[in-house]
């Protein structure tokens, strides 16, 4: 079964009034929102408070998840959450994320993938549109002696890099959040070297699951019906309007227009899906087995040295 992707955050969605208030971030002398002064412990505490506040706003106020506290706490070690996926990606891509490899993280969030690549010695850059997420990621980088300016504010539709600049482009749980899917994919391919690779992990919205709200929803139905179902659960529906409801058929057709060879990753069922299943899990598994629609989709694009 494909991975359950890490959430991506778009905090520009209007927020409903919710109590109690989010955690208070302790004061700190800042440069572009980064805690650039104080001893190591002070800066670590400030970073932890800032991450907690950021993801509390997302999980509790935007999505209304009942387990928001645990999810926000898990973000304090979010690098550990993405490391297994990137380790598997090395195997799929026959690649090593190591010193000398030039990597771009398209949609860097609060810096999880960026930090993992940097710690592995990669020459890594990242772009992310959310200014608070950029400030948090830069704070992480500065704490570990990494150039924070390598983490830039920007969008996947307009990457500020020359053609053929990167060996690897990583777009993990981001594509459903961009404004223009085609333009974002074209830009990622453009900045990749010939014979370089683009790693894309996203959702398939023909399934009976919505990974941000963590609910079994028939995403293949019109959006207005999904909104009614969300409202019946007491959830705010405005975040749904920010999503691109992409599926693997759309991406397959898009990739066929590009100078790439596209490889789809299909993994075996993990152990929890081999035993006694809940009703929503049975529906999801039936769709996978009888309609060949995975809950998530992971692609590796190998860029050709010339158009076909």
Image: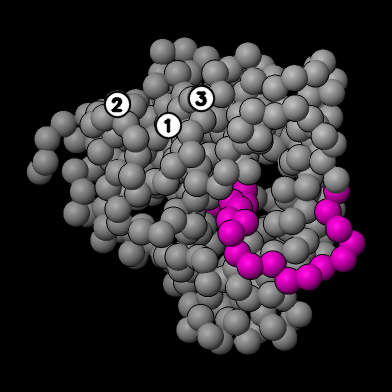
Discs 3, 2 touching: Cβ within 8 Å: no
Discs 2, 1 touching: Cβ within 8 Å: yes
Residue at image point 85% right, 36% down: 26
Ranked by sequence position, the earlier of labels 3 and 2 is 3
Q: Is residue 184 left or right of residue 111?
A: left
Can residue 272 be seen in this snapshot? yes
Magenta stretch contains residue 9: yes
Instruction: Provide the residue designation for mark 1.
Output: 104
- Residue 94 location, x and y as percent? 40, 27
For this rendering, which residue is in front, 141 or 231? 141
Element assignment for label 2: loop
- Residue 284 location, x and y as percent? 59, 70
Q: Nearer the viewer, mark 3 or mark 1?
A: 3
For this rendering, which residue is in front, 126 or 74? 126
Residue at image point 61% right, 33% down: 32
Does 86 appear above or below 144?
below
State which region is magenta.
Answer: 1-23
Does 68 appear above or below 286?
above
Instruction: Provide the residue designation for mark 2.
Output: 165
């Amino acid at each position: 079964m494909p991975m359950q992707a890490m959430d991506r955050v778009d905090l520009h969605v209007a927020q409903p009034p919710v109590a109690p208030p989010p955690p208070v971030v302790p004061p700190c002398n800042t440069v572009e929102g980064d805690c650039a002064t104080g001893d190591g412990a002070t800066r670590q505490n400030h970073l932890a408070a800032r991450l907690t506040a950021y993801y509390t706003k997302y999980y509790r106020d935007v999505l209304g998840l009942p387990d928001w506290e645990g999810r926000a706490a898990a973000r304090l070690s979010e690098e550990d959450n993405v490391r297994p996926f990137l380790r598997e990606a090395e195997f799929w891509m026959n690649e090593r994320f190591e010193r000398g490899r030039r990597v771009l993280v398209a949609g860097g969030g609060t810096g999880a993938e960026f930090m993992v690549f940097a710690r592995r010695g990669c020459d890594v850059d990242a772009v992310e549109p959310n200014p608070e997420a950029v400030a948090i990621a830069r704070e992480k980088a500065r704490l570990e002696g990494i150039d924070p300016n390598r983490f830039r504010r920007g969008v996947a539709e307009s990457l500020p890099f020359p053609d053929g600049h990167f060996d690897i482009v990583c777009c993990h749980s981001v594509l459903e959040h961009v404004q223009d899917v085609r333009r974002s994919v074209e830009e990622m391919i453009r900045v990749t070297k010939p014979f370089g690779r683009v790693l894309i992990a996203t959702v398939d919205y023909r399934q009976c699951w919505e990974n941000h709200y963590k609910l079994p929803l028939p995403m293949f139905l019109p959006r207005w019906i999904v909104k009614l179902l969300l409202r019946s659960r007491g959830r705010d529906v405005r975040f749904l309007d920010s999503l691109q409801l992409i599926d693997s058929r759309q991406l397959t057709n898009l990739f066929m227009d590009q100078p790439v060879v596209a490889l789809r990753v299909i993994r075996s069922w993990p152990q929890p899906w081999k035993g006694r299943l809940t009703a929503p899990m049975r529906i999801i598994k039936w769709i996978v087995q009888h309609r060949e629609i995975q809950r998530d989709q992971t692609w590796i694009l190998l860029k050709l040295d010339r158009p076909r």
